[in-house]
Image (spheres, coloured by chain):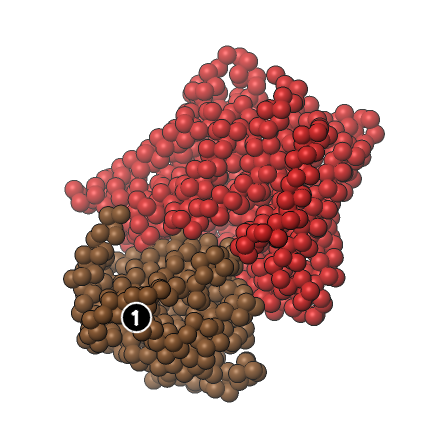
Amino acid sequence: MGEKAISRRGALVGGGVAAAALVGLRPARAQGAPVRIGELNSYSRMAAFSVPYRNAMQLAADTINRAGGVMGGRPLEFIFRDDGATPGDAVRVAEDLLTRENVAFIAGTFLSNVGLAVADFANQRKRLFFATEPLSDAITMAQGNRYTWRLRPNTYMQTRMLTEAARGQTARRWGIVAPNYEYGQSAAANFKRLITQSIPGAQIVVEQYPALGRVDAGATVGALSQARPDAIFNVLFGPDLTAFVREGNTRGLFERRLVLSLLSGEPEYMIPLGDECPEGWIVTGYPWEQVDAPAHRAYVEAYRARFNETPRMGSLLGYVTVEVLANLLNKANSLDSEALVEALRDLRSDTVTGPVTMRGLDHQGTMGTWVGETVLRGRTGAMRNVRYVDGAEVMFPEAEVRAARPNA
Amino acid sequence: MDPGFLLVQSLSGLASASSLFVIASGLTLVFGVTRIVNFAHGSFYMLGAYIAVTVVPWLLELDRSPWLFFAGVLLSALAVGLLGVAMELLLLRRIYKVPELFQLLATFGVVLMVQDAVLWIWGPVDITGPRAPGLRHGVEILDQRFPAYELFLIFVGPAVLGLLWLLMHRTRFGILIRAATRDREMVGALGVNQALLFTATLFLGAFLAGLGGALQIPRVSASAQMDLSIITEVFVVTVIGGMGSVTGAFLAALLIGQLQAFGVLIFPKITLVLVFVLMAAVLVVKPWGLLGRPEPAAGRAALPEGILHPRRFGVVEGTIAMLAVATAFVLPLFADAYTLKVATEVLVLALAAFSLNFLVGNGGIVSFGHAAYFGLGAYAAGLLVTRLGVPMEPALVAAPLAGAFFAALFGFFVVRLSGIYLAMLTLAFAQIAYAVCFQWVEVTGGDNGVVGVWPSPWAASRQVYFYVVAVCAVAGIAAMRHVIYAPFGATLRAARDSEVRADAIGVDVRTHRWLGFTLAGAAAGLAGGLYAFSKGSMDPTLLGIPTSVDFLAMILLGGIQTVMGPVIGAAAFHSIKDVFMPLTDYWRFFLGASIIALVLIFPRGLGGAYGKLRGSRPVQHA
């Protein structure tokens, strides 16, 4: 109860600014039957990411509703559900949302296997599924389907941002360390393919795939340094990353070595590293304090005022998701699945990260992310020399998409 | 490879082994004395780490001395020890009289509650603890740098081993622990205060787990997943060493530490499964682990923990069963789509749970890896449909065949063992099957699994598919129920209650158990196939430890001493989960609390409670 009271007040302070940026100053409050959207995510298992994500979604929805809602005055309403972090639970929850909660469509999911199972379920039921966080390339490529769309830059795109940032480097001998599941494996596979385009003659001299959440950091660091690579591509995150970085720092693994690291610049993973944050890694991430676009700054202020914490990557994703979905509903002006899918095709939305287009060819959004170098500021890590890479620059080549999705 | 690297790599292995041993020694002591398979041991480890990342920085604010760091670590371990005492006093003490497996269920409830309590108290973001003052640096060993803190850890394991040895051999408490590990009933008969002994042992066990967790904070961050990531490994260590043997745990930890340190060089992708392969190999060769002793119960008639007298249905039970089946078959006429979906799942789970209780309740074969046959059935059906284009009907025939085939294959080794070792071997095989499904990406789709497993067009609607599941599940359950009442079922019960006597009257115990295991595998495989078609996909989590534990929770909730209990248990478990999941992020807390409440209120399960109500309580054994 208390949270609700606070959130209302906070929204009054901060929301107005963002509302102005979002939809223009329309005074009318949303009325009429709400548009219900089912959002399922791993709120319990992956709370560090998904709770800020849900907070930002609520903030964005409230902001939009205060400014008049969607589809000519209907309020947006999100029904949040835990997906249990397993495909079996998630499919049941999706069914619940579609049948009992009567949502117009479903969005969300975190883990790739959950996302793929829900995508196939949506395809079977012919209902729209707007995947937000699962990064697996398969969702929009080999196992893509008509009803599934994904906003966030996928593994291929994020890997390509890093390998392009490494252009001009001279490191030839590379080591790879990645968690042993689909995300890690496909990041490693993409990296092997892309690094030679940036650095001709690059070769992989060592690969380590510790089990997710169970890295034996000492043994892994030992195995990597034994191969004496010039540079390392890291895909570990969360507790694995912390253990790996600590062990690597003490054993000098990162000294005089170039490191490319996926996602490590995101606050979710940067904050736990604290003063252990290594310097000079090239990472993808979210340096929220350095993004100066007025709309983004307004959202950050509103978010901080309402939730009393700094935004995370999850917050940004949640906010942008709602902006895109609101735009979609306004464009489609219908809750029919087929109409929504057609409206999503090449839909261009203005968001706090800039324009985002949902590419019709592979159903992948062009939302980008930031690439920069890690640096230690005081007792916490940060990013410097930051550059926003638009997703459109690093998407799968069209020929590859056509090969992977014959029906596209 | 240069010798410096080999040395440092094996030092890394020793450091991991040392940490692992500290935790495992607690588990093995608790098991030795109380016979409780304490799932909550991993939770104590996690709590140790969380309390330490809270307490230690606070102490270091006063003075950055190494002594305060270690004082904080010990303080955290003590606090966790007290939590262990609380668990013993408030929960376990109330259920020592019920079958041992129920205590496992209660500790599983604790695991769920602690997971969410930790999220609630410390928040979802991982917390990185401070490094130990004075041990931050690296030490040069043959041109390789090695963390000083890990050098220190290497000595912690032997130190704990030494202290435990002194405790066990030089104090009265230790002697009692050893005595209770050898023969608990005898210790009780000699007038030892068992309640106090158990409380003290739980304190010691939780203290060691907390110490293990607190010592990790300079290496890893405290995160809400660390309980489950450690618990299986610790079980493996205690089982390889021999349950109840501290020295055995030490040897096993050394073995596993080195296996992982060098395993990553040769098999960088499959280090996790290596330890289970090792465990399976050790158990096949040495059925009681490296230094374990045969369980005291083995060889003599033990208190049976399963179905005693399978009563035939009376008028009331018959009516209830008829009504239940009739309700199931008219359900699609009035239930909404979602209720039907949940009902479909309940039926599938009921079949799987029934097949597990066929082993546990009727055969005394406690399987911790029953999900393997469920999952393999799902994979067999799903792969036939997606890779070979086979329609649903033959795929559903293949599912039980696959379950039976793998159950026969693994069961051949499993039925040679008994008790906890048998349970752990089933777990090892399940993990190996899991690893194959996880790693063999080209065929199984890896951890993403395989999607597109939908029923044939005629069965595509929820209603029709519900009937498909209902017919298969009811037929499967009825068939297995028939077997329980048949001479074959009675023979399994005889073998369960006294292997020696059964053998003496000419029963081929192993073959009977093997056939029983295979039959249960077939039923689980059928359930898995039905499940895959209801979800449209399958992935390795179907074979995972959590699924196996869910099945165990279902049969225990329902009551392993009753024939039909597992069906009730499956329905109850799934309903509780379905009620709480949409309500709150902390649904695991409420699921855990519900399980504990049910264990306390119905210590013999829901089915057992019904039996008591009907006055059909089986013969009381003293």
Residue found 46% across the figure and 24% down from its top: B93
Tell me the residue that label 1 is attached to. A73
Instruction: Specify the farthest residue to the right.
Output: B506
Position above or below: A337 against B302 = below
Residue found 53% across the figure and 83% down from its top: A408
Of the chain colours in the picture, the one used for chain A is brown
Q: Amino acid at mark 1?
A: Gly
Image quarter for residue A20? bottom left
Instruction: Specify the farthest residue to the top.
Output: B191
> Mark 1: which secondary structure?
loop
Foreground pick, A195 / B556: B556
Position above or below: B565 against A13 = above
Foreground pick, B190 / B151: B190
Side (left or right) of A67 relative to A330: left
Q: Residues within 10 Å of mark 1 (few under 14, many from 20)?
A: some
Foreground pick, A334 / A406: A334
| Numbered marks: total | 1
Residue found 53% across the figure and 75% down from its top: A145
x and y percent of residue A229 in the render?
41, 71
Q: Label 1 marks which chain's residue?
A: A
Q: Would you say residue A384 is visible in this rendering?
A: no
Q: Would you say residue A30 is visible in this rendering?
A: yes
- The red chain is B
x and y percent of residue B457 in the render?
67, 67
